[in-house]
Image: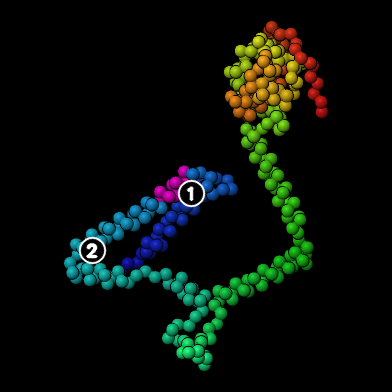
Amino acid sequence: MKNIAPWWIRIPLLFFTIFALMEYFIDSGEQPAFIAFPMAGAFLLFILILLIAIELILAAIENVMFQTLTDKGKERYLASASKRWEWTWGKKTYKKLLGSKPIEAEGEIILDHNYDGIRELDNKLPPWWVYMFYATIIFGVIYLARFHVFNDYDQDLEYEQEIAAAQLEIEEYKRTAKDLVDVNTVELLTDASDINAGKTIFESNCVACHMADGGGGIGPNLTDQNWILGGGIKNVFNTISEGGRDGKGMVAWKQILKPAEMAQVSSYILTEINGTTPANPKAPEGDIWVETP
């Protein structure tokens, strides 16, 4: 006799087991793994197709083997297959929640009403409906006590809390998404990783005009306190992004460098080059910059 679950239970059970294991072991933050990582979704689709293919192959093998049986063997097999698996607990629970009388017992609840041969049954409300109704009453009492008796938070407070939480998430996102920085939001970077990255960018792109020590060549001296287009992180970032003076200044680097890279090289210039003593400094150009609070 067959004692295994049918395919329509096996496939969902195996699929959701694999899905749960994947979600447990893959760190995808607040998003489900199959949304955060498209490959995870593709993997789940592959697993589903594979499970269906396995069931089809097994069914085909079963059919081929059935054809090889003798007539008596086929009869025994069909008799065994007719005794199908049943989910006894689920079936009993369903009947209990439905609460309806079986057809053979409907005579006990039939009413005297007769509408052109149509008789009416005095069925009770389904238990599942009654339980849900009781649950709504309990929920209403708790809600009334919490918000109208004990004066828990109101909608205004909930809104303010959600706004504050969203603002924190935005700030955290901006902190980690450095390429969102622009001239209005850029800040002086001090982390060693950012300074080292800025040094690499400077040595790869800027030394031809400003020299390795920042003393200046074709471009101005970056070590003194004079700035042609203003000092400070915002002005230096803007100069690198948009370029120098029309016709004779530095080219705009915004098409070449990412915003995060421009912030890094700007911070490197201000923290590691400005204020040092180069070997052959170029004469100061521009005005002395004084940082205002």
Magenta region includes residue 41:
yes
- Please, which residue is most extreme toward the bottom here? 112
Mark found first going from the N terminus, 1 or 2? 1
Residue 89: image quadrant is bottom left
- Tell me the residue at 23%/59% (across/down): 64
Q: Is residue 102 visible?
A: yes
Look at the image and tell me in which quarter the C terminus lies.
Answer: top right
The alpha-carbon separation of the residues under discs 1 and 2 comes to: 38 Å
Image quadrant in which the N terminus is located? bottom left
Residue displayed at 60% across by 21% down? 201
- For the residue pair 262 and 96, the one nearer the viewer reads as 262
Asked if disc 1 and disc 2 are in contact, CB closer than 8 Å, the reply is no
Question: Which residue of the protein is positioned furthest toward the left in this rendering?
Answer: 70
Res 195 seen here: no
Q: Position of residue 26 (x, y in %)?
A: 51, 45
Residue neighbourhood size for the residue with mark 1, other residues' Cα within 10 Å, grouped as few (<14), some (14–19), many (≥20): some
| Residue 274 counted in the magenta span | no
How many other residues sit within 10 Å of disc 2, few (<14), some (14-19) or many (≥20)? some
Task: Give amino acid for label 2.
Answer: Phe
- At label 1, the amino acid type is Met
Q: Secondary structure at mark 2?
A: helix
The vertical placement of 141 against 197, above or below, is below
Q: Which residue is mark 2?
A: 66
Instruction: Give the number of the disc on residue 22.
Output: 1
Please state the extent of the stretch shown in magenta in the rendering. 39-47
Mark 1 element type: helix
- Expressed as whole percent of the image width and height from the top left, the position of residue 116 reads 48, 89
| Secondary structure mainly formed by the magenta segment | helix
In the image, is 272 to the left or to the right of 205?
A: right
Q: Is residue 122 above or below residue 207?
A: below
